Image: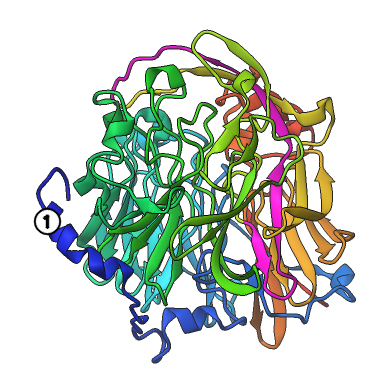
Amino acid sequence: MKGTRGLWFFILAVCASFAMTPPFAFAQGGNASLESTSQDPNQWAMPLGNYSGNRHSKLNQINTGNVSKLQVAWTMSTGTLRGQEGQPLVVGDMLYFESSYPNYVYAVDLNHIEKIAWKFAPDIDKLAPSVACCDVVNRGVAYANGKILVTTLDTKVYALDAKTGKVLWTAVNGDPKLGQTTTDAPLIVKDKVIVGISGGEYGVRGYLTAYDLNTGKQVWRAYSVGSDADILVDPAKTIDGATQQPVGANSSLKTWQGDDWKLGGGTTWGWYSYDPQLNLIYYGSGNPGTWNPDQRPGDNKWSTTIFARNADTGVAAWAYQMTPHDAWDYDGINEMVLEDSQIGGSTVPTLAHFDRNGYSYLLDRRSGKLLNASKFDPSVNWANSVDLKTGRPNVDPAKMTKSDVNVKNICPAAMGAKNMQPMSYDPRTKLIYAGTNHICMDYQAFSVKYKSGFPYVGAIVNMFPADNGDVRGRVIAFDATTGQTKWANNDTFQAYSGPLTTDGNIVFYGTLDGWFRALDESNGKLLYQFKAPSGIIGNPITYMHGGKQYVAVLTGVGGWAAIGLAEGLTKGTEGLGAVGLTRSLADYTNLGGTLVVFTLP
């Protein structure tokens, strides 16, 4: 709801946002709920594998002892050339995936891989690619109750019949004429389809929206910045995770100058997790607009924030801002991994988040209380630490960006010490396995005026490898409770593929220059690699079919990390500063989308 209308409804409903609501089981190929389906390791029924978002599989047929024998079982073209940033789903005998723009959706019967079961080619607004910030990517489809849920670049949401591909309903989530696009994978919770919005570099004010799974009707919408009614908070009940106190009235508005919040960013283009016991959805908001911090004094709440929202009403239970007054483009949209941690001798339900700003955050997911914050990349220098008492970063004044000053050697770069590539958490080892970036930047802000549908950035950025070396990426094993890195495996380019861990003690991931790799989970040793048709920014999955374990990954270089190659850009500061970072990537790989599926002989 917008404006003040509906505020009292949400205040009355806020008690529900803290209730312990049991999961609502809806029919899904029998009587199993989506939650139970996601726990079946033979399938991959959610974009991140399950509601906890841990991207870990219990399958172990492929293991450290035999992974060196892995071979390609079959492949399939996506029909598109740009970045493939998502992952397939496997439900029963069917595999589903979505390509980059123009967002083709495919269904493949795993019993008949020689034939496409169905293909959906949406009619997309041709304006959308011109306002897509960082390539025309998509992060995959969702499944529930016999439906495939799809987002397209021009902000539409489709429900398709999983058997036929027939359109069951369509919703419009935004307008490309305003710079709005959609690139995220939906999350299905009970009878709701949760989707976000992109466009933070176009002055778009971010929001998260819930649509009815059966009808496509909008149920609730929660903005990241604005009035209490718009952002769906109760001033007396919604908790500020940093202070553990109620956020109070106008918690967002009073941190902006004048009406700057109307162009405030905080877009929601990342990943979403869900705790069925707490009935809370977890996600992050992006950078504030503009990139010039001098044009927007204040903390700019609630951009760069982790939100916990009631799934039924959208009302926020708590909010924790990681980078107040973001002056570096440190979006907070990266995934939230839900786990149970041992804290002070007690088991605490926690949320782990690797932020763009280079810090790993461990929060009590019931209240948003900060439990630990540690650098996960050694180059991080924009802040010396995060104060565990105040929840705020201790910023190095020399790294604070400002108008008309070229601030040098800020680490990490705007692309982040980790971007949207989702990490994996293995409940057995209690470790996180993440693809990270080892990069820094020079950043010169300047004044910029807003015009609808045009870039609203206000900064010239030049990115380069940290340490003046040839390492731009690292795959690491990390303990979020202690802040210790157990091992690190260096890559020439940014590690932009989300790792997958398995009970076979394997870490699968892809590289920007096109290697699909398997590492030993215990020490990071390389056990297998295959040179894929194109660079990999997709996220591998695994499943069982016909008694055999398979591993599948979308290959197809692009995204912000490879925007120079994707769009033919050559000037180092183009692509929001990313082009110079990967100027040599064209020597190693080329454009082209392909689904590649591996198995043992």
Residue 508 appears in the figure: yes
Q: Position of residue 492 (x, y in %)?
A: 81, 38
In the image, the segment drawn in magenta is 423-452
Query: Which residue is denoted by mark 1 in the rendering?
Result: 8
User: In the displayed structure, does residue 404 sit left or right of residue 578?
Assistant: left
Describe the element under mark 1 as helix, strand or loop.
helix
Horizontal side of 351 relative to 240 (left or right) equals right
448 is within the stretch colored magenta? yes
Please say whether residue 435 is one of the residues in the magenta stretch: yes
Q: Residue furthest left?
A: 5
From the viewer's perspective, is residue 277 above or below residue 236? below
Examine the image and state in which quarter residue 171 appears: bottom left
Closer-to-camera residue (259/571): 259
Q: Is residue 400 above or below residue 261?
A: above
- Residue at the location (66% across, 51% down)? 497
Question: Image point 44% across, 35% down: which residue?
Answer: 132
Where does the image place residue 470, in percent across and percent down from the top left?
A: 84, 32
Residue 581 falls in which quadrant of the image?
Answer: top right
Q: Is residue 30 left or right of residue 336?
A: left
The answer to whether residue 314 is above or below residue 267 is: below
User: How many numbered marks appear?
Assistant: 1
Residue 8, picture quadrant: bottom left
**Residue at x-position 59% and y-position 41%:** 356
Amino acid type indicated by mark 1: Trp
Please tell me which residue lies in front, 29 or 427: 427
How crowded pointer 1 is (Cα within 10 Å; few <14, some 14-19, many 20+) is rated as few
Task: Say left or right for 24 vs 554.
Answer: left
Tell me the residue at 38%/64% (across/down): 149
